[in-house]
Image: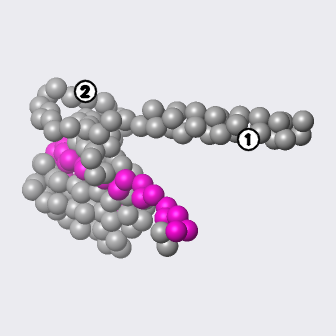
Amino acid sequence: MRLRKLFTLILLAAVTMSGLAALAQSDKKPAMTSTAIEWNSTDVKTNANGSSRKFFEGPTATLGLLECHASTLMPGATNHVILTRPHDEVIIIKEGTIEAFVTDKWVRIGPGSVIFNAANVPQAMRNVGDVPATYHVVMFQPAAVPKKTAAEK
């Protein structure tokens, strides 16, 4: 009788774990495919410092997450306090004059300039010009790397 209860418990645990694994897989978004997005086709969201437009966000065939948006900062506005983020990002200035906090100092840049913010390094931006400053942000995170089993080590 005890053996039957143990077998039933093991079977129930296996079925539950299989169901949880399937549920976890079903929550993943499919990989994004190639696309072209027209500037005026995106919704504009205003905030206290300016506005933003999201172009896309999701996994790709090689990345766990790829996100792109454009932000506009009003003159004198800052995007956020100096902070660190756990991911890398590239910022391309479209128009205006920005001061970017890069590692440990403020750097003045203008249209066409590019910023690379490495993961876990202090960063921030502020509009130091007299017109709105617009920039594109491309954020990317690698896909989760599966842990090696004891046999693979």
Dot 1 corresponds to which residue?
A: 10
Amino acid of disc 1? Ile
Give left or right: position of 36 versus 26.
Answer: left
Badge 1 element = helix
Residue for point 25% across, 63% down: 116
Give left or right: position of 141 versus 21.
Answer: left
- Number of residues whose C-alpha sits closer than 10 Å to that of mark 1, classed few (under 14), some (14–19) or many (20 or more): few
Residues marked 2 and 1 touching at CB (< 8 Å): no
Residue 45 in the image: x percent, y percent? 30, 30
What residue range appears in magenta?
Answer: 123-151
Q: CA distance from mark 2 to mark 1?
A: 51 Å
Residue 32 in the image: x percent, y percent? 25, 38
Dot 2 corresponds to which residue?
A: 43
Residue 12 higher or lower than 142, as above or below: above
Residue 141 higher or lower than 68, as above or below: below
Quadrant (top left, top right, bottom left, bottom right) of the N terminus: top right
Task: From the viewer's side, name the closer residue of 35 and 21.
Answer: 21
Badge 2 element = loop
Specify the quadrant of the image occupied by residue 111: bottom left
Residue for point 33% across, 65% down: 118
Q: Is residue 124 visible?
A: no
Residue for point 51% across, 35% down: 22
Residue 133 in the image: x percent, y percent? 19, 47
Amino acid of disc 2? Asp
Residue for point 17% across, 60% down: 114
Specify the quadrant of the image occupied by residue 58: top left
- Number of residues whose C-alpha sits closer than 10 Å to that of mark 2, classed few (under 14), some (14–19) or many (20 or more): few
Residue 27 higher or lower than 130, as above or below: above
Number of residue marks: 2
Instruction: Single out the residue that lies furthest toward the right.
Output: 1
